[in-house]
Amino acid sequence: MSDSTAGTRTGAPRWAWLAAAAAPALVGFVALGLARSILLPGQGFWDTGEFQSVPPVLGTAHPTGYPSYVILGWLATLALTPVGEAALRMNLLSALLFAAAAGLTVVLVRQLSGRTSVAVGAGLLLALTPIPWRMGGFADPHTLHLALMAGLLVLLVGWERGRRAGSPRADRWLVASAALYGVMLGNHTLTILLAPGIALFVLAVDRRILRSPRLLALCAGALVGTTVALYLELPIRAAMGAPLVYGHPDTWDGFWYVVLGEQFRGDLVDPFGDLGRKVADLVKVADVQLGILAVAVPAAFLLTALRRPRFALLTATWLVVICWFAASYTNAAIDRYYLGPVLIVIAWLGVASGLLVEAIVPGGDGRARLGARVLAAGLAVALVLPAAVAAPATASRVDMSHDARAADWSGWALGSMGADAVVVSWWSFSTPLWYRTVVLGERPDVEVVDDRDRLDENLGTVDDVIRANIALRPVFLVRNSAEISALEATWILKVVPDPQGIEPLYRVVGPRPASGWVIPGGARQQPDARAARPATMTP
């Protein structure tokens, strides 16, 4: 089947549409089962804790605010209420998005190759690849980015096919892709890196589009309108006094500080330096993720470029720009940034497999068609087999199904604090404390003062927060050992050992006599008790 006739035809009977949906649905169901098998059962530390806490209360996450993910997460926590508490629902949302990405991979590869079997193989390969599989197991907007990226590719390829077929409705695909791009901008700034590839692709499909002001205006309106509508969530919810709002997005300066990720300027280090090491690191990533299939990626790209040149131009541009950025970015768990490249190379492998079938067994009589199906099935097995063989070892590495550390630690920590306590914490341990105090409503008397609170509310140093509260309420600390050593020069600290050995609490008993500071007998003004805000983190 040629590219122009691949997939379900317009006007096909309803059963044909159901048959076309069966393969993506089946792969999505398998992917959902894989994600469910390793799913984090509840709370997490670090970003995970934030993304389990902010969406249920419709707050604002760390820059760039992630309004697409926050709004979707809020809806998911409502729709999945019977499943369990909010943390589990947010984790399950990632599993569902992971399943959607795998199903859309099937749709994409089938669009380009006309072969359902190799498309199924590509979808299953994505589901079994370590980074996507792991990201499907806990709350994180990068999994939404993967699903949206797969959807964007489907729409762009659909537009190209419609243009080539002369369909009068083809441009609707391009307008839809512009709106979806706006949703992506509301989810993650990595989306900006996709713009050059999209521009090259659109021009490669039809340069005359520059002489179509109405279409360009529709696309611009869909993109800008969607993006603006989503980002309005930040100032509106902040003005409503929502809990867990990062920064002050209800002010002009605060809004742009969050949206533009001002705090991360300077994290892109020496982008054009040490290119040899960066390429070597990328080769290692490819080997870990794809195993023996990694050696076939260059050939798969060349075959894709020969037969699907515009798709190859689009995705190769994406791959180079994203990998260049990730290799030069110094803030975050960078493996998450390779979700897009993983999708791209798997699409190349799937498309190349389908094109090989077309080249080796060209269309003909019934025997030729049967031979083509058998060869396509064999290539699909070849795509999946290495990852399937490695699946038990991969599952053991990405399994989070027994990880209850965040829930156990946060429950113990809150239970160890006295009434009306204040705890000065830092990002990784603040997020599960927020989840319990804000989302679950446990210990509303406890105030969590994160490093971000100290900045946003002008509370000063950790020492300043202690001084402002020590005369009024119990003060506890969750700090690293170096900070604790420095604070012990001024304060008498009593360790509250964590029985699990994760992170101890420190109770501030009072000032050291040698410090010359005496707790005043009168009342002291308490710090602003507005909602806590997370510490500086990666966009």
Image (cartoon, rainbow, N blue to C red):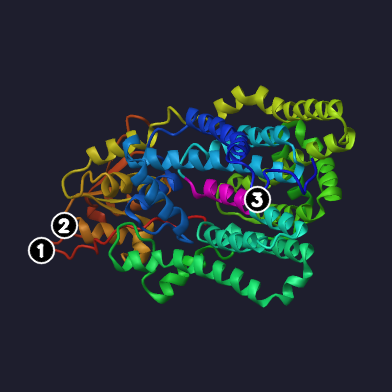
Instruction: Name the residue carrying label 2.
Output: 471
Residue nearer the viewer, 361 or 340? 361
Prevailing SS of the magenta stretch: helix
In percent of width and height, residue 503 lies at 37, 38
Q: Secondary structure at mark 2?
A: loop
Q: Residue furthest left?
A: 522
> Is 415 in the magenta?
no
Residue at horizontal 55%, vertical 72%? 221
Are the residues flagged by discs 1 and 2 in contact, CB closer than 8 Å?
yes
Left or right of residue 42: residue 365: right
Under mark 3, the amino acid is Val
Residues in magenta, as a range:
140-154
The crowd level at tag 3 (other Cα within 10 Å; few <14, some 14-19, many 20+) is many
Separation of marks 1 and 3 at Cα, in angstroms: 67 Å
Residue position marked by numbered label 3 in the rendering: 154
Q: Label 2 sits on what residue type?
A: Ala
Residue 424 percent coordinates (x, y): 31, 52
Front position among marks 2 and 3: 3
**What residue sits right under mark 1 in the picture?**
522
**Quarter in which the N terminus is drawn:** top right
Q: Secondary structure at mark 3?
A: helix
Q: Earlier in the sequence, mark 2 or mark 3?
A: 3
